[in-house]
Image (cartoon, helix red, strand yellow):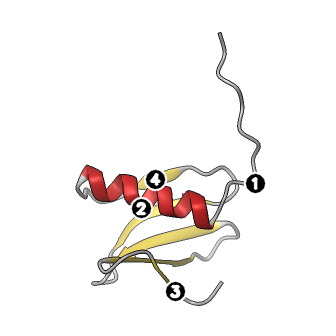
Amino acid sequence: MQDRHVINASYYCKRGSRPGLILVLNTGAYILAEYNEGTGDVKWQRVIPAEQKKSIEKWLSQHFPSSQPQQAASA
């Protein structure tokens, strides 16, 4: 991965200090979320509009797919 990947005009991501950690930042370099590449989990640290949040989560899952297999829902 390059140093930075542009998600859209307002957000970008880069690798964190731990393996498998992707940081989501805004153009002001504030950390908004942490994405775990191994599990596909996103931990939000700042509040952003739901539509943008959903768009960022979709972008992350497309560009950094989880290495953990998806489990079927229990009955």
Reading the image, the residue beneath label 1 is: 67
Q: Give percent across and percent down for residue 27.
A: 30, 83
Q: Using the rendered view, name the quadrant where residue 1 is placed.
A: bottom right
Q: Earlier in the sequence, mark 3 or mark 1?
A: 3
What distance separates the C-alpha of mark 2 from that of mark 4?
12 Å
Mark 3 residue type: Arg
Q: Earlier in the sequence, mark 2 or mark 1?
A: 2
What distance separates the C-alpha of mark 3 from that of mark 2?
15 Å
Discs 2/4, front: 2
Reading the image, the residue beneath label 3 is: 4
> Circle 1: is it few (<14), some (14-19), or many (20+) Cα within 10 Å?
few
Reading the image, the residue beneath label 2 is: 56
Label 2, secondary structure: give it.
Answer: helix
Mark 2 residue type: Ile
Q: Which residue does the image show at 34% across and 83% down from the upper left?
A: 29
Left or right, 64 with reference to 56: right
> Circle 3: is it few (<14), some (14-19), or many (20+) Cα within 10 Å?
few
